[in-house]
Amino acid sequence: MSDRQAESAAQPSDRAALYSDLQRAIPGLDAMYALACAAIDARVPHDGRILVVGAGGGRELAGLCDGRHRRAITAIDPSASKLALAKRAARQAGVEDTIDFVTTPIDALPRQAPFDGATSLLVMHQLADDDGKLAYLTSLRERLSEDGVLVHADVCLDGRDELDVLVPAFLQYAQAAGIDPATTRFELDALSRLPIVSESRTCELFAGAGLAPPRALFRSLWYRCWLTGR
């Protein structure tokens, strides 16, 4: 069974454990999620609307639902099983009732009231760069309000040479953190098969989708996070 098949066949609790281990294997990735929530909190009105795209494991939901504001949060994912993980994480954090969960891709989400803020954390690297990435970002921009803000995280590599330089540090860090070698293999196998693009190409896609020039928020190994918007 391949790593991808193993992930698909795993029970929700197993997938949650895998995502948790992957998060611990990347230096500072917890901080990226916290920083993404802080960026949204700083820019979105207290009664604003927030869209969480690719809600998946629900890692950012608790941070967005801090109880201090009356924001309306919509969490979407095209995978019902992954959205179930998000619901589970929200339930454990005591915030499930404050979130509207919708099983849908971004391009099928009805364009009703625009969102004041959105997060897209580690979603786009799974989409092909044959207009798939551009269409995704365009759909996001179309659902933002005029001053809406987007926090976008992605996996970026400038080629095999950059990966070869970074992998030894990744493996050493993961080993010191007590990460199962199967988890690090899963990560590296994913990098080899996913349609990952460079940071410069990502910035071109932002521009092509009509988004503002991105400002860097975070970087660790091949993980990047930016602040942009309409």
Image (tube, helix red, strand yellow):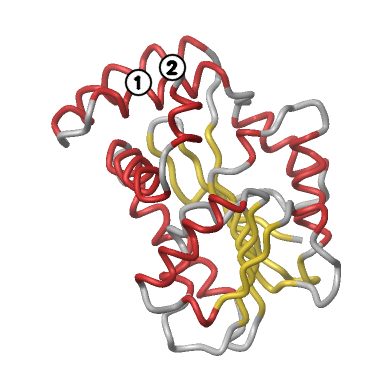
Q: In the rendered structure, which amino acid carries the disc numbered 1?
A: Arg
**Residue 55 lies in what quarter of the image?**
bottom right
Closest to the camera, between mark 2 and mark 1, is 1
The residue that appears at 64% across and 70% down in the rendered structure is: 74
Comparing 183 with 188, the one in front is: 183
Label 1 belongs to which residue?
A: 185
Give left or right: position of 172 versus 216: left
Spatial CA distance of label 2 from label 1 is 14 Å
Comparing 50 with 32, the one in front is: 50
**Residue 145 percent across, percent down from the top left:** 78, 71
**Residue 229 lies in what quarter of the image?**
bottom right
Give left or right: position of 196 versus 191: right
Please rate how many residues cluster around mark 2, counting C-alpha atoms within 10 Å: few if below 14, some from 14 to 19, many from 20. Answer: some
Label number found at residue 150:
none
Give left or right: position of 213 versus 173: right
The residue that appears at 74% across and 27% down in the rendered structure is: 129
Please rate how many residues cluster around mark 1, counting C-alpha atoms within 10 Å: few if below 14, some from 14 to 19, many from 20. Answer: few
The residue that appears at 49% across and 60% down in the rendered structure is: 86
As helix, strand or loop, the secondary structure at mark 1 comes to helix
**Residue 73 percent across, percent down from the top left:** 60, 75
Label 2 belongs to which residue?
A: 163
Say if 216 sits above or below 95 in the image: above
| Quarter of the image where the C terminus is located | bottom right
Q: In the rendered structure, which amino acid carries the disc numbered 2?
A: Leu
Q: State the count of labels.
A: 2
**Residue 157 percent across, percent down from the top left:** 53, 24
The residue that appears at 43% across and 17% down in the rendered structure is: 163
